Amino acid sequence: MKRITYLLACCILVALTAFDCGGRICCEPPPCSQIGSLKGTWRLDYFQNTATGVVDTDPEISGKSVVFTFSDDQKSGTISGHTFVNTVSGAYTLGSDCTFKITSFGGSKVGEPEWSRKAWFPSDSAGGKGNYSVLSDKLILKFDQNPEQLVFKKDK
């Protein structure tokens, strides 16, 4: 009888600890982002095709890069920064489940090289909706209408 009680107690203990989800309800998926904000200054590291996995890295032209600063209150925010040769600005809103919508984006857009031209965000009317993820020092933006996601690393 003691063996059965001991065995039953061990099974219950294993069952209770085997499904530990770090304080979350186990049926919930993990959060899509560590924070609900894009806030910070981010340098574009590469584009990645989500269907093929092909990566197009920053050509690292001396003194050139794509750097955007996002500032928000976890609901709406502004974008400022520069591409290889242009200054840019814009605005965005954040939604539930790590969604975002670019409400405006623009700049001088003079003589933009191919790689940094792909960093121009479409506005809402041109498919400027998507999902984001912030994990440690990495920001990933994936627009709904684009097979490439933009992967940024923390700049400051």
Image: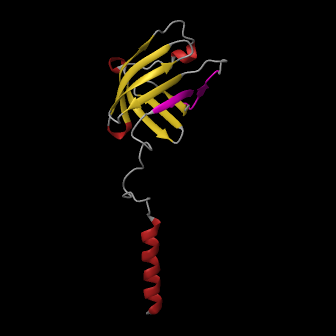
Q: Residue at x 37, y 53 (%)?
A: 28
Q: For the view shown, which residue lies furthest in the top direction?
A: 111
Q: Which residues are magenta?
A: 40-59
Q: Taking 12 as reference, is 112 left or right?
A: right
Of 94 and 156, nearer the camera is 156
Q: Residue at x 46, y 9 (%)?
A: 108
Predominant SS of the magenta segment = strand
Instruction: Establish if 104 lies above or below 24.
Output: above
Residue 116: where, in percent of width, then height?
A: 55, 17
Q: For the view shown, which residue lies furthest in the bottom direction?
A: 1
The quadrant where residue 65 appears: top right
Residue 57: where, in percent of width, then height?
A: 61, 26
Q: Residue at x 42, y 23 (%)?
A: 79
Instruction: Establish if 37 lies above or below 150.
Output: below
| Magenta region includes residue 45 | yes
Indicate the quadrant containing the N terminus: top left, top right, bottom left or bottom right.
bottom left
Of 41 and 44, nearer the camera is 41
Instruction: Establish if 114 lies above or below 56.
Output: above
Of 88 and 131, nearer the camera is 88
Can residue 48 be seen in the rendering of this structure?
A: no
Residue 83: where, in percent of width, then height?
A: 53, 17
